[in-house]
């Protein structure tokens, strides 16, 4: 069901983009230069404007329905609740599926005797 609504949603999005691009510019973008007085100076709605509104309303309706469908499918479980039900046992050291390499018992940094105290002097 969700896939069908999603395909319809994408088709409506492409149609809405196409309809808006095909429409003729009426000038006065963002209301700049609009006429004063009681009338706004806009022509009455034509078929293209009505079609734009219908596609836009259908686009919003599919957006809301996709939200409702996804909310119903997710139920009340959170990701932590779903993932936390299984307890994973750590792999034993030395097996192939061990995620952490075996570091041995000595986790201290190397002693100063192993590394030189200063860099070697340059030859002159």
Image (tube, rainbow, N blue to C red):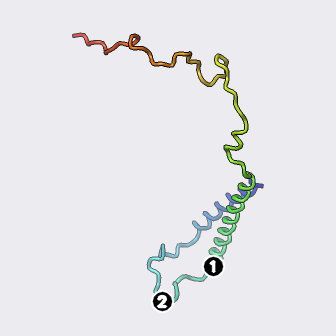
Task: Give SS at disc 2.
Answer: loop
Q: Residue at x 71, y 54 (%)?
A: 70
When the figure is inspected, residue 83 is found, relative to residue 6, above or below; the finding is above
Q: Nearer the viewer, residue 49 or 58?
A: 58
Viewer-closest of 49 and 23 = 49
Q: Which residue is mark 1?
A: 46
Badge 1 or badge 2: first in the primary sequence: 2
Disc 2 packing (10 Å; few <14; some 14–19; many ≥20): few
Residue 107, how many percent across, how many down?
Answer: 51, 19
Residue lying furthest left = 124
Please indicate whether residue 124 sits to the left or right of residue 64 in the image. left
The N terminus: image quadrant = bottom right
Residue drawn at x 46%, y 86% is: 36
Left or right: where does residue 25 sit relative to residue 63? left
Percent position (x, y) of residue 15?
65, 63
The circle drawn on residue 37 is 2
Q: Position of residue 105 (x, y in %)?
A: 55, 16
């Amino acid at each position: 069901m969700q896939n069908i609504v999603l395909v319809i949603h994408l088709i409506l999005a492409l149609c809405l983009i196409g309809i808006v691009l095909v429409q003729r510019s009426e000038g006065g973008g963002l209301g700049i230069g609009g006429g004063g007085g009681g009338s706004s100076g806009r022509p009455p709605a034509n078929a293209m404007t009505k079609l734009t509104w219908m596609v836009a309303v259908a686009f919003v309706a599919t957006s809301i329905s996709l939200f409702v469908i996804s909310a119903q499918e997710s139920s009340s479980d959170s990701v932590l609740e779903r993932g936390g039900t299984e307890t994973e046992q750590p792999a034993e050291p030395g097996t192939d599926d061990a995620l952490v390499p075996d570091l041995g018992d000595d986790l201290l940094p190397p002693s100063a005797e192993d590394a030189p105290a200063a860099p070697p002097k340059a030859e002159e």
